Amino acid sequence: MRWLTAVPVYNEAKHVRGVLAEIRRYSPNILVVNDGSTDGTKELLAAEPGIARVDHPTNRGYGAALVTAFRYALDQDYDVLVTMDCDGQHEPARVPVLLEAIHDCDIVSGSRYFRDFRQDTPAPSDRRFINATVTREINARYGLDLTDSFCGFKAYRREALEKLRITETGWGMPLQLWVQAARLGLRVKEIGVPRLYLDPNRAFGGMLNDPAERLAYYRGVLAAAERDVLPGLPAYDDLPACSECW
């Protein structure tokens, strides 16, 4: 099995070198998608040997960086794509666990709420509430059984990437992913990963700093994802009503 570990990066000069040093211990093939960083991250990456890099000239968003990683993995004919963040929340030592788990499914997703770990840190209250709310709504509406709908630490089979049509460029990208995964009948598995918030005050930016606005945005992403055109599938307009959703 040939796999790629991809890391979306935006203004991560504080963490990027240490994270890449750890990833190298577990993954021989690394892609960094530099999403328009302006803090010196690009210059640090230029000095990193043995990595592939794609630079977005301007900041396009978290989802856009992952879409670039999807396309790269397909173009370079990788069997599995692993994605992880660069802010210290994800432990590269868990990459082998993801790879082991994907043998009988299409997407393996880390969950910070699947089980407890010694190194867990408290999640900011607004993030935990929104995650729990959105995860409950996704499960009720799309028949999934998730415990963490936002974790970016994932592994994807090539066959899954070929079927997905992700267009959401922002933080809500994982929600479009789950709707499409449900519609496509992809096999999904969660594995427990530590819950590490090194900077609990880190902001989303703009209106998403307001929890109510953020929740409304996420629900809008879910609603829009039902209208996505997917190869060989009808529009997703025959779902039963769900009193807990939207």
Image (cartoon, rainbow, N blue to C red):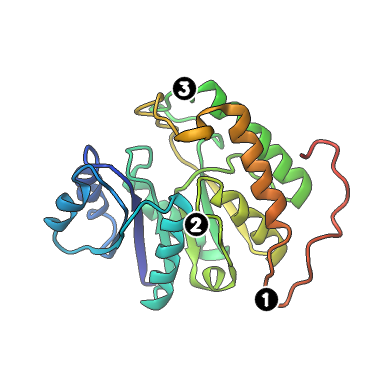
Please tell me which residue lies in front, 233 or 28. Answer: 233
Q: Which three-letter amino acid code belongs to the residue tagged 1?
A: Pro
Residue hosting label 3: 122
Q: Is residue 38 visible from the viewing direction of this image?
A: yes
Q: Quadrant of the N terminus?
A: bottom left
Q: Residue 231 has which mark?
A: 1
User: Which mark's residue is nearer the viewer, 2 or 1?
Assistant: 1
Type of residue at label 2?
Ala
Residue at image x 78%, y 39%? 245
Q: Give the residue displayed 37% in from the left and 55% down from the top.
A: 96
Q: Describe the element under mark 1 as helix, strand or loop.
A: loop
Whether residue 152 sits left or right of residue 245 in the image: it is left
For the residue pair 237 and 50, the one nearer the viewer reads as 237
- Report which residue position mark 2 lands on: 101
| Foreground label between 3 and 2 | 3
Image height of 207 relative to 182, above or below: above
Q: Is residue 69 left or right of residue 15?
A: right
| Residue 75 percent coordinates (x, y) | 39, 77
Q: Position of residue 192 (x, y in %)?
A: 50, 41
Q: Secondary structure at mark 2?
A: helix
- Measured in 3D between alpha carbons, the distance from the residue under mark 3 to the one under mark 2, in whole angstroms, is 26 Å
Q: Residue at x 20, y 52 (%)?
A: 42
Mark 1: give few (<14), some (14-19) or many (20+) Cα within 10 Å.
few
Give the Cα separation between the discs numbered 2 and 1.
27 Å
Q: What is the distance, in whole Å, between disc 1 and disc 3 at their CAs?
A: 41 Å
